[in-house]
Amino acid sequence: MCGRHGDAEVVLEVEDEKAQHVSAAEPVDVLKVLEFHNLPEGIKKTSGFCVNRKTSRPDTAFRVGKEAQLSAPTKQLFPGVFPEDFSVLMTIKPKAGMQSFLLSVYNEQGVQQLGIEVGRSPVLLYEDQHGKPAPEDYPLFRSIDIADGKWHRVAISVHRKTATIIVDCKKKVSKPLLRSDRPVISTNGITVFGTRILDEEVFEGDIQQLLIVADPRAANDYCEHYSPDCETSFRDTPQAQEPEEEISLDPKAINQLITSSPVPY
């Protein structure tokens, strides 16, 4: 009896682990939450990564202009907690030569905790509840240029104290992420698309997909499960229709943005 009970416990643990992995793999579709499909000011539809896709309709994407201003309370993306380890998955075609933030996550005090800067040298801005890492230690991927006017599938994995970027399913670069042992990203602030507050630079270009997955392994599977090659049909894949110093915003302004989001501010 004891042996059977032990076997049952092992089976249950395995099943629980599988269930947790499936649950963790559910992506947060940022473009959907920000209502890109409603074509707000500065957003219009355009052709996507694959003009011709096998057994499927051609991909569609969104063209982002300078005037686009999109934000939402972070709790609309993550009603619970922001995952400690995660993947950010994107299919984008930035304007040639540009360098700007694609996504910025702020806490309720107006401190930018997470930023995905894309362009000639992508940067992962990350700052946990203890202010780690310092701005000079943000992962900077100098050897990668995705601002060449072409489509790119970009996957960023954050796992423990390492940040890895995978571009076009081939080029892979890892950098240390010197964060705390139990880092926390607050969900009580706002998430801003295409820039960071008080920045003059804004994202311009085309975007087909922007997902956040609570699984650092998802980055390795991006081109298989989320943004497949043009020879593959899309099926049920989600498709939305130098390091700089941190900038803090007055908490009162953050509260105004939270209460006014998701409409453009």
Image (spheres, rainbow, N blue to C red):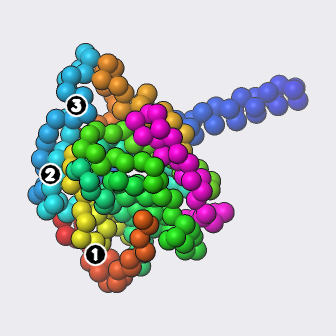
Quarter of the image where the N terminus is located: top right
The residue located at (24%, 62%) in the rendering is 202
The stretch of residues the image draws in magenta is: 162-187
Q: x, y (%) of residue 182?
A: 63, 63
Amino acid at pointer 3? Asp
Give the distance between the C-alpha atoms of the residues marked 2 and 3, in whole angstroms.
16 Å
Which element is circle 1 on?
A: loop
The residue located at (21%, 35%) in the rendering is 48
Q: Within the magenta stretch, is there residue 232?
A: no
Q: In the image, 257: left or right of 90?
A: left
Give the distance between the C-alpha atoms of the residues marked 1 and 3, in whole angstroms.
33 Å
Q: Which residue is identified by label 2?
A: 43
Of label 1 and label 3, which has the lower sequence position? Answer: 3
Up/down of 109 relative to 24, above or below: below
Amino acid at pointer 2? Ile
Q: x, y (%) of residue 15?
A: 64, 31
Mark 3 crowdedness (10 Å alpha carbons): few <14, some 14-19, many ≥20: some
Q: Nearer the viewer, residue 76 or 265?
A: 265
Of label 2 and label 3, which has the lower sequence position? Answer: 2
The residue located at (55%, 66%) in the rendering is 137
Q: x, y (%) of residue 112?
A: 41, 70
Quarter of the image where the C terminus is located: bottom left
Q: Which residue is identified by label 3?
A: 59
Which element is circle 3 on?
A: loop
